[in-house]
Image (tube, rainbow, N blue to C red):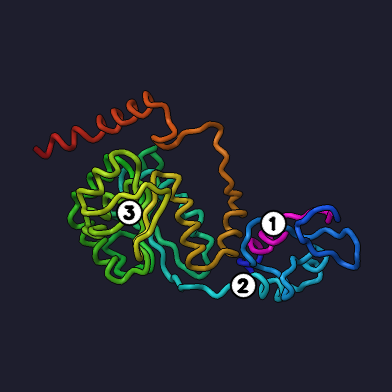
Amino acid sequence: MKKLFIPLLFAIIMIGCQQQNQSNNENLNSIKGSQAKTFKKQNSENRNLKPDGTAYTRTELDTMSHQELMALVHEVPNDTIATIGILLYEGYFMLDAMGPLSVLNSTPSAKKLLIGRDKGIVTSSSNVKIQVDYSIDDIDQLDMLVIPGGLVGTYKATKDEELLDWIKKIDQNSKYTVSVCTGAWILGAAGLLEGKEATTNWYKAEEKLSLYGAKYVKKRYTNDGKYWTSAGVSAGIDMSLALVDHILGRNYAESIALNLEYDPSPPFSGGHPDKTDPVINYFMERMYDAGLQPLIDSEK
């Protein structure tokens, strides 16, 4: 609980405070008629309020003990997660795996495992090498399995029957089976998305998912039962925060988001075909086509 206290306390302290102004209509609490600093709710949810429905002031929070603060922000989890495994294979996209890991690594109690097709060094698409201590032969059960995407390496993984069989085995008892970006291709190839709503990287998204009997949903992330899927690369962070919110509650999810200072503000509009110049869209499609076509041709 001590490890949990720091991010939760940060989440409380940094929610925001301001001087009470008698001319506003924000219904902030005052203490003894003074203009004491008080916390302003950043959303419309009635969380972490006093029994009378008003916000705690900084002064009131300062007088609370560790136990009292923990009791204030504690939420009963919707679920318990003991093991989280992230599959790493040659050519996976780095952020697809490490974005979710950065979020999920803050979940209490759960053991986090990086799992390779084989033990040893696994190299990402950006040539970053990571030592992986577990192989698929070592792991028979996980509460949560996260499968990142890639391009060439991902396509190869969709043809790896031994890997797909392992994924199906893990899925039989998992509480959450999760993909990031084109990792949905691997879930689909394992037969796990048939009849499900799912999302994936924008590249030929509907075409790719339809091959596996899934219905493409143009969303940043989505879930259909225990199957959670995200759009490309960075969307895995959004999905992972949503998972934490779902499993452990909003207070814990907000503390993680604040710890990561996850407050995206891109310098320009883009990042999705709907927001990107058509010439850039075409160019990127051609780039992906060029990467995959030699593999597709070799199978003919």
Q: Residues within 10 Å of mark 1 (few under 14, many from 20)?
A: some
Q: CA distance from mark 3 to mark 2?
A: 32 Å
From which residue to which does the magenta span run?
6-21
Looking at numbered disc 3 in the image, what kind of residue is underneath it? Ala
- Location of the C terminus by quadrant is top left
Residue 292 shown left or right of residue 254 in the figure: left
Verify whether residue 8 appears in magenta: yes
Looking at numbered disc 1 in the image, what kind of residue is underneath it? Ile
Expressed as whole percent of the image width and height from the top left, the position of residue 155 reads 24, 44
Q: For the point 38% across and 43% down, which residue is it?
A: 93
Residue 90 shown left or right of residue 64 in the figure: left
- Residue sitting at the far top: 279
Expressed as whole percent of the image width and height from the top left, the position of residue 115 reads 35, 58
Looking at numbered disc 2 in the image, what kind of residue is underneath it? His
Secondary element type, mark 1: loop
Task: Give the quadrant of residue 254.
Answer: bottom right
| Residue 236 seen anywhere in this rendered image of the structure | yes
User: Disc 1, disc 3: CB below 8 Å?
Assistant: no
Vertical position of residue 282 compared to residue 127: above or below: above
Q: Which residue is mark 1?
A: 15
* For marks 3 and 2 on the same chain, the one whose residue lies earlier in the sequence: 2
Q: Which residue is mark 2?
A: 74
* For marks 1 and 3 on the same chain, the one whose residue lies earlier in the sequence: 1
Q: Residues within 10 Å of mark 3 (few under 14, many from 20)?
A: many
* For marks 2 and 1 on the same chain, the one whose residue lies earlier in the sequence: 1
Verify whether residue 222 appears in magenta: no
Disc number at residue 198? 3
